[in-house]
C-alpha cells in the first residue's frame, strides 16, 4: 500500500495573468471616510463603478501575432464571439488552409477543432497553439474591484496632469497579506481608475496605470493607453489601448503582452456589443464528459473503489491524452488494484507531460521502492519530488521509504517524522496510517521496539485494515512487547 499525493490540476487557460490577479480582487471590504470635498471612499468607488457597463456578449474580428524568442508566427485572423465573459469561440483560418479551425473555451477548458475535425483536441496550454486567448474583458476586472466594498478617501493627487482621488482599500480578513496596500487613483472628472497600486500576491506585485489618455472638450476621457505590470520572478507587461464605445462600454482595441521569452499581440476590429449568441455555439460535449468522469473518478478513489475509478479515468485519457491529473489518478488506482505495470506506465506519462511537477517522480519512486527495485534511481526521483515540493508530506514519506529500503534508517525516521508534521490531521486517515507504519518499521530496524510499537498501534487506529501493521505488531508481541 502506498501513499500518493492526488491532485486535480486546473486546466490552463491563457488568460492574461495580471488581469486575472486584478479580477480576483472583487468584493474587497474597506473603510469609509469623508474628506473636505464632501466625498467619501464609498461615493468615489460608486462613481467609478457607474462608468462601466461591461458587455457580456460581443462579436468581432481579432488578429494575433506571437514572437517566442527569435521565432515569429505570422498573423492569424479569426472571428471572435464572447458570451457571458467566460465562454469564447474563435473561428480562424490557418495559413494555407481552405476550411476554418475553431477554438472554444468555457473559461476552464479549451477545445480545438482542426479543420474538418468533428472531435476536439483538449488544450491545456493554449500558448502551444501559437497564440493566446483573452477570455476576460479587461475593464471587467476594475468593475469587479469597485463593487461590494468601501473605500477610505486618503487624499488628492495629480496624475497625467489630471486631478485624481486616492482611495485605499482594507484587506480581506482572510488574506491580509494580499491587498493591504491597494490604492485606487480615480479621475475626478471621468471617475475612471488611472492607476491601481499595491495589487499582487506574496510572489509577485502588480500595478495598473494609464500612460496616456484622450479626452473630449468637456474633459471626459474617451480613450487611454494603459499597462499592467507584474513584477515577480519573471516580469510580464501587458499594454492595452482602451476605447470607450457607446453606453460606457470599454474594450481594448489592442492588447500586447511582453514576457521574458514570449511576446503576444491582439488587435480587435468590427466589434459589436450586447448581441444575441445561442448557447449551441459554445457547447462542447467532451467538456461535460470530462467533468463528470473526473468527479466520479475522484469519488471512487475517495471510497477506495479502484476498479470503478480506473474506468472513469480511462474515459478521460481516451478523450484528453495530455491530462496530467487523470494519468496520475489512473496510476494511483492501478497500483492500489495491484496492476503495477499499468501504474508505472501512467506515472512515466506524467513525468513526460509535466517534467517540472513532482507528482510523477514521487509516485514512480514509490512503486520502485515498495517493490525493492531500482532503489538508487527511486531515491533520486523521490529527492526530486521533495525538491520541487518540500512542504508535501506524502512526498517526504516516499523519500523516507527509499532511505529505509537502502538501510539509512536515521534519514528515514527524519523524513517520516517531517511527513507526519506536514500532513496534519486533515489528510486522509489511511494515508497517515501508512506513514506511521513506515515510521514503526524504521524504529524497529534500529531496535527501538517501544517506539516501533507505538507507531504500529497508531497506524491501526487510523486504518484497522492495514495488514502490514497488524503483522508487525504480532511480531513485536512474540518478542515480549504486549499489546496495550
Image (spheres, rainbow, N blue to C red):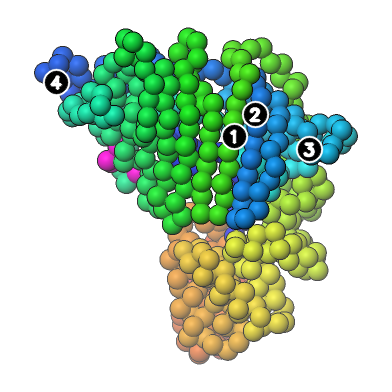
Which residue bears the numbered disc 1? Answer: 266
Residue nearest the observer in this picture, 291 or 197: 197
Which residue in the protein does label 4 denote? Answer: 35
Residue 474 x/y as whole percent = 61, 79
Residue 239, percent across and down?
A: 47, 37
**Judging from the image, what secondary structure is the residue with disc 3 in?**
loop
Q: CA distance from mark 3 to mark 4?
A: 57 Å
Few, some or many residues within 10 Å of mark 3 (<14, 14–19, 20+): some
* Image height of 112 relative to 274, above or below: below
Q: Which mark is residue 101?
A: none
From the viewer's perspective, is the residue at label 4 or at label 2 nearer? 2
Q: Which residue is mark 2?
A: 62
Circle 2 — which element?
strand
Q: Residue at x 62, y 55 (%)?
A: 70
Q: Which segment did they paint magenta?
A: 178-182
Question: Which quadrant of the rendered structure holds the N terminus?
Answer: bottom right
Q: Is residue 334 above or below residue 379?
A: above
Amino acid at each position: 500500500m502506498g501513499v500518493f499525493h492526488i491532485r486535480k490540476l486546473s486546466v490552463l487557460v491563457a488568460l492574461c495573468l495580471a488581469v486575472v490577479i486584478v479580477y480576483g480582487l472583487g468584493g474587497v471590504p474597506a473603510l469609509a471616510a469623508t474628506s473636505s470635498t464632501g466625498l467619501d471612499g464609498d461615493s468615489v468607488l460608486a462613481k467609478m463603478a457607474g462608468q462601466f457597463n461591461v458587455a457580456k456578449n460581443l462579436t468581432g474580428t481579432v488578429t494575433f501575432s506571437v514572437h517566442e524568442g527569435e521565432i515569429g508566427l505570422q498573423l492569424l485572423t479569426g472571428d471572435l464571439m464572447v458570451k457571458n465573459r467566460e465562454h469564447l469561440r474563435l473561428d480562424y483560418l490557418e495559413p494555407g488552409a481552405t476550411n476554418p479551425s475553431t477554438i472554444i473555451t468555457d473559461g476552464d477548458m479549451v477545445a480545438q477543432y482542426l479543420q474538418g475535425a468533428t472531435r476536439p483536441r483538449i488544450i491545456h496550454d493554449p500558448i502551444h497553439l501559437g497564440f493566446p486567448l483573452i477570455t476576460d474583458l479587461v475593464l471587467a476586472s476594475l468593475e469587479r474591484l469597485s463593487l461590494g466594498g468601501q473605500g477610505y478617501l486618503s487624499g488628492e493627487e495629480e496624475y497625467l496632469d489630471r486631478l485624481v482621488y486616492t482611495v485605499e482599500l482594507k484587506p480581506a480578513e482572510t488574506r491580509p497579506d494580499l491587498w493591504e496596500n491597494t490604492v485606487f487613483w480615480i479621475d475626478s472628472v471621468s471617475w475612471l481608475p488611472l492607476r491601481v497600486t499595491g495589487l499582487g500576491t506574496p510572489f509577485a506585485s502588480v500595478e495598473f496605470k494609464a500612460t496616456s489618455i484622450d479626452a473630449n472638450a468637456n474633459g471626459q476621457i474617451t480613450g487611454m493607453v494603459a499597462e499592467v505590470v507584474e513584477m515577480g520572478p519573471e516580469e510580464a507587461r501587458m499594454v492595452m489601448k482602451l476605447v470607450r464605445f457607446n453606453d460606457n462600454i470599454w474594450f481594448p482595441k489592442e492588447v500586447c503582452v511582453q514576457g521574458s521569452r514570449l511576446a503576444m499581440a491582439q488587435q480587435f476590429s468590427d466589434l459589436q456589443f450586447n448581441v444575441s449568441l445561442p448557447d449551441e455555439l459554445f457547447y462542447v460535449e467532451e467538456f461535460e464528459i470530462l467533468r463528470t468522469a473526473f468527479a466520479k473518478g475522484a469519488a471512487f478513489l475517495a471510497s477506495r473503489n479502484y476498479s470503478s475509478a480506473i474506468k472513469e479515468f480511462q474515459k478521460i485519457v481516451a478523450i484528453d491524452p495530455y491530462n496530467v491529473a487523470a494519468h496520475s489518478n489512473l496510476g494511483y488506482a492501478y497500483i492500489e488494484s495491484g496492476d503495477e505495470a499499468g501504474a508505472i506506465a501512467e506515472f512515466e506519462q506524467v513525468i513526460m507531460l509535466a517534467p517540472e511537477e513532482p507528482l510523477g517522480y514521487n509516485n514512480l519512486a514509490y512503486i520502485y521502492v515498495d517493490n525493492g527495485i531500482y532503489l538508487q534511481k527511486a531515491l533520486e526521483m523521490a529527492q526530486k519530488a521533495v525538491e520541487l515540493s518540500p512542504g508535501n508530506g506524502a512526498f517526504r514519506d516516499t523519500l523516507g521509504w527509499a532511505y529505509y529500503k537502502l538501510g539509512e534508517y536515521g534519514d528515514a525516521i527524519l523524513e517520516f517524522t517531517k511527513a507526519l508534521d506536514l500532513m496534519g490531521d486533515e489528510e486522509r486517515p489511511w494515508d497517515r496510517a501508512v506513514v506511521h507504519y513506515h515510521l514503526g518499521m524504521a524504529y524497529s530496524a534500529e531496535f527501538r521496539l517501544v517506539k516501533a510499537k507505538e507507531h504500529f498501534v497508531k497506524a491501526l487506529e487510523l486504518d484497522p485494515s492495514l495488514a502490514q501493521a497488524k503483522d508487525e505488531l504480532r511480531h513485536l508481541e512474540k518478542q515480549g512487547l504486549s499489546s496495550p
